[in-house]
Image (cartoon, coloured by chain):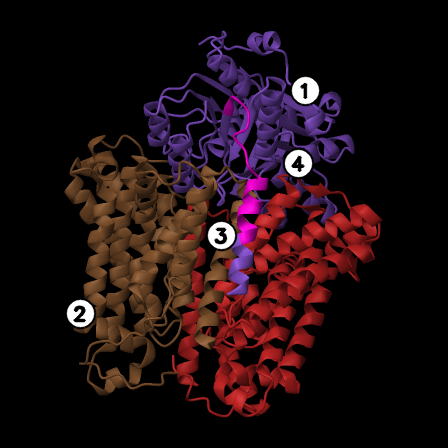
Amino acid sequence: MKKLTYLAALLPAALLATGAWAADETIAVFTKNQTNPYFQTVRVGADVAAKSMGATAVHYIPTKPDSIPEQLSQIEDVIVKKPNAIVFVPVDYKAMTPGVEMINEAGIPVVNVTDRGAGGEYVAFVGADDYSLGLETGRFLLNAIGGKGNVVILEGVKGSLTSIDRVRGFNDAIKEFKDVKLVASQPANYQRLQGLQVLENLMQSHPQIDGVLAANDAMAIGAIEALDGANRKAQVAGINGTKEAVDAIKTGKLLASGDYNGFLQGCIGTMIAIRDLRGESVVKEVVLKPTVINASNYQPYDVALDARTCPTWEEAAAMETKK
Amino acid sequence: MSITDNPTTGASGIHLSKDMQQLVYRLLAAGLLCLALSIASDAFLTSNNILNVLRQASLLFFLASGLTLVILTGGLDLSVGANIGLSACMAATAIKATGSPVLGTLAGLATGLLIGLCNGLMVAKLRIPSFIATYGMLWVLHGITYYYMAGESIHGFPPEFRQIGSGYFLGIPIPIYLMVVFLLAGTFFAQRTVWGQQIYAIGANPVAARLTGIPVDRRLILVYAFSGAMAGVASIVFLARLNSAEGDIGETMTLPAIAAVLIGGASLFGGIGSVFGTFIGALILTLVLNGMNLLAVNASWQPLVTGAIVIFAVWLDMYGRKKA
Amino acid sequence: MSDQALSPSAPARVKMPSVPGVVMALALLFILFAALSPGFLTTGNLSNILVQSVILLLLALPMTLIIMTEGLDLSMGAVLTLASLVLALTILSTGSLLLAFAAAVGVGLAFGLLNGWLVSMLSIPPFVATLGTMGAAQGLALLVSDGQSVVGIPRYVRQIYSGDVIGIPNPILIGIGFYALFHVLLYHTRFGTYICALGGNRDALTLAGVKWKRLLISVYMLGGAMAGVAALLMTARMNAGHPTAAIGMEFDAIAAVALGGTSFEKGNGWVLGTLLGVLTVGVLRNGLNLMAVPSSVQVTCIGVLVIFALLLDGMRSKS
C-alpha cells in the first residue's frame, strides 16, 4: 500500500510540472507521430511562431504513430478544453474528415498543414506539393546521372498520400528521360533499415543501378549504406530535407533531398491561426515551391532547427498561392 | 498443447534427439523455400546473395536468440524491439560524447542488459505475467526514447565502430561471424550446461523445477537479462550498419523476432525449442523478404505472402513433430 | 496446470478477487483527473470517454474468451481493418448497409474460422497462426483498397456512431448490449462453462465427450464476428475505410484484458474486469490529453499503468 501512496503523491506533481494552457491564446497543434523528424520540424516551426507572437502552442501527437482512431479521440478530448485555434496535420487526409467536422461544429478555427484535408472547413491550407517535389527531385537526380541508366524507387508506406504522390512524381520524371530504365519500385515503408535491406536485395538481381529515388531521407540514407557496403556507386536522392540529409549532402554522400520545409509550414500555419484569431488579414492558401537541396544550396539549411526564425508576415503572405 | 508427454526434463539427450527429428522438417521448409527461389530467380543462388541474406538474418537472429531462452522458460519478451531503440540511442550518445567506440558499445550493451534485468525482476520477483510486464516495458521504453530523442536522429560514427556492422573479414561480413559465435555459444549454453538444462526444466514444469531445488527466480532473471543484453548486441550491430540512431528503429522487429523463434520450433508454453531452430526461423523470414525483393513482388502482396509462409513453416514443423 | 477438477455441467466458478488492481487503478486515476483537470468531470467528457472506449471493448470482450482458452488472436486489428474496407466497398457498390454489414461480419467469421481451424485442427500455436493470418488480412486490406482510403460512404452511416437514443450515444448502447451478451454467455450458459474448461481442463472436456475442437473454432469465430461488428463502428466513425486504421489494436485489447485481471493460464477470466480495463486505459488517455501532457510522457504513463495494475494484483494474491 505504501507504493500506492507514493504514486498518488508523485503523479499529480509530475503532471502539474508539464502543465500548459497558461497564455491567453492557446494553439493546439496536431501532428502525425513523434518518430519522423519531419514532424518535429513542423512542431518547432509552430513553437517559434507562437512564441514570437505571444501565444502558446500545445502539441497533440498520437502515442501510436499515425493512428487514425487515436487522433480522432484526441480531437474529441481537445474540444473539451476549447483551445483558441487548431493547427492540424491530419494523419489521413480522407479518414480524418469527421474529426475536422467536429472541430467545425465546436466553432474552433482550424488551419490545415502538410496534407490537404479532403473535407471540413479550414481557415487556410499551408503545405508543399508532394507530386511536384517528387518530380523536381527526380529530374535533378536523372540529370545528374546524365539522363540515362538504371533507376530504382524506394516507396514509403503503402497507402500514405505522401508516398503515393512522391512516387507518382518520380515516375513522371522518369518518363521524361527515354534512356532511363526503372528497374524496380519496392516499398521500404519510410524505414531506414528497410531502405538498406531492400536495396541490398535489389543489388543482387540488378548488377547495374545508377540512381536511387527514395520517398524520404531515412530510406535514402539506408540505401547509401547498402551501396557503400557493396562498394558500388549510384546517385541517391531523398525527400524531406532533414538535418541528417543536409549533413550527408555536405559530405557528398547524398546527391539531393527535396525540401518539404516543415519548419516553414509550421511557422506559417501557426501565424495564420493566430492572426485569424486577432482579426488580422490572412492568406487562404500557401503551397511552398519545391526546392531541391543539393551541394550548391545547402548552406541555409545547415542551421539548428530552433535557431531558425520564421519569416515576417509580409514574406509569408508573399508566398500565397492563388487558386 | 499439453507438455506432459515430455516428463523427463533434466537429461540433455532427450532434447537433442527430439530436436534432431524435428530439425529435418524445419530444414526441409528452409530448403523448399531456397529451391523455389533459386528456380524463380537467377540472382538468388549466388555467393553474394547468400552472404547478403545471412547478414540480414543476423540482426533478427541476435534479437531472437535471446528471446529463445525467455520462451524456453514459458515467458515472452515483447520489449526487445523498443529495447533496441533505446540501447542504440544510448550507445550513439556515448560515442558522440566520448568519441570512443568501446565506451559506446558498452553503453548500448549495458542499457540492454539493464532493461532485461528490470524485466526479469518484474517477472521473477513481482510475479507480473511476462507478457504484461514486457508490454508495459515496451511503452515505458518508447516514452523515454521519444522524450530523449525528440524526433531527431544521431548520426555519423567513427569508421572503426562501423566495422562491426559493415566490415568484412576474409570476404565475409563481420555480423555473420558474430552470428556464428552467438549461435554456437547459445547452443552450447542451452544444451550442454546445467543452467541451460535448468531453463528447459523451468519451462517444462515450473512447479517441479522449484521442488527439485532449481533456483527458478535467479534463472528467470538471467534469461530476461540475457534477452535484454542480446537486444543490446543487436542495437550495436544495427547502429554500426545504419550509421544512425532513431527512436523507432527496432519497432518493426519484435513480432518478426518472436515469429523466428516459433518458426524455429519453440513452444510458447516453454520447455521446447532450440537456438539452432531459431537460427533457421530467422533465416526463413529473411529469405521470404529477400525473395520478394528479387522477384519484385507487388507491395500489397508482401504481408500476405509472409503470413502464409509463417503458417506453412510452422505447420510443417508440427506435422514433423507428430510423425516423430 | 489446473488444480481443481471442473465438472463441465456445473456453472463456471470464477474466483472474484477482493479488490482487484484494475478497480484501484481506475478509482485512483478518476480521482486524480477529477481533482486536477477542470474539464474532466463533465457529462460531455465522461460520455466522451465511454464512446471512445467502445470499439476497443468490442475486441477485448471476445479476446477475454480467447485468452481464457490459453489462446491469443493477433489478427483482430487487421481483420477489423479488412472488414471495415469490405464494408465501405460493399456499401459503395450496392448501397445497402445491411448487406455491407453482413459482408463485414462474414469477413470476420471467415478469418475466425481460419484461425480456429489452424489452432485446433492443425495444432498450430495461436500466436503463430494468428500472426500469419494478421499478415494475410493486412495484405488483403492493401489489395482491396489499393492502399488508399475508401470514401464516399453516405453520411447516414456516420449516424451509427454519432447518433443517440434518448440522449445516450449509440456506441454506449452497443457497448452495454455486447457487454451484457458476453456476461450472460460466459457465466450463464453451457458454452461459457466449456470455455472455462478449455483453458484449464481440456482433458476433462474430452472425457465428458465434448467436441472441444469445434468449441475452440467457435470461440475464434466469435472473435472474428466481433471484429466485424467493431468494423461497422470504426467505419461509421471515420466515414471511410482505411487500410491501416486498426493495425495494432489487438495489443491494446490484450493489454486491457490482462489489466482486467484475466490470466493467461488456467482459464480464469473476468469479463467485468475487461470492461474496467478498457475504461482505465480510456480514462488515462483522456485525462492526459485534457492536461496536455506531452505525447512521450503519455506513452510512458500507459506502460507504467499496465505494470502497476498487475503489480497490485500480484501483491494481493500474495497476501
Q: Residue at x 31, y 36 (%)?
A: C44
The residue at which mark 4 appears reads as: A210
The tag earlier along the polypeptide, 1 or 4, is: 4
Q: CA–CA distance between discs 1 and 4?
A: 38 Å
Q: Is residue C135 left or right of residue B254?
A: left
Secondary structure of residue under mark 2: loop
| Image coords of residue B261 (percent x, y) | 53, 69
| Type of amino acid under label 4 | Asp
Q: CA–CA distance between discs 4 and 2?
A: 69 Å
| Type of amino acid under label 2 | His
Of the chain colours in the picture, the one used for chain A is: purple
State whether residue B156 is above or below residue A242. Answer: below
Tag of residue A309: 1
Of the chain colours in the picture, the one used for chain C is: brown
Q: Residue at x 20, y 65 (%)?
A: C185
Circles 3, 4 touching at the beta carbon (< 8 Å): no
| Type of amino acid under label 1 | Thr
- Which dot, 3 or 1, sits closer to the camera? 3
Question: What span is in magenta?
Answer: A9-26
Query: Does residue A261 appear anywhere in the picture?
Result: no
Circles 4, 2 touching at the beta carbon (< 8 Å): no
For the residues beneath circles 3 and 1, the answer to whether they share a chain is: no
For the residues beneath circles 4 and 2, the answer to whether they share a chain is: no
Query: Does residue B109 appear anywhere in the picture?
Result: yes
Which chain does the numbered disc 2 sit on? Answer: C
Q: CA–CA distance between discs 2 and 1?
A: 67 Å
Which chain does the numbered disc 1 sit on? Answer: A
The residue at which mark 2 appears reads as: C188
Please tell me which residue lies in front, B6 or B164.
Answer: B6
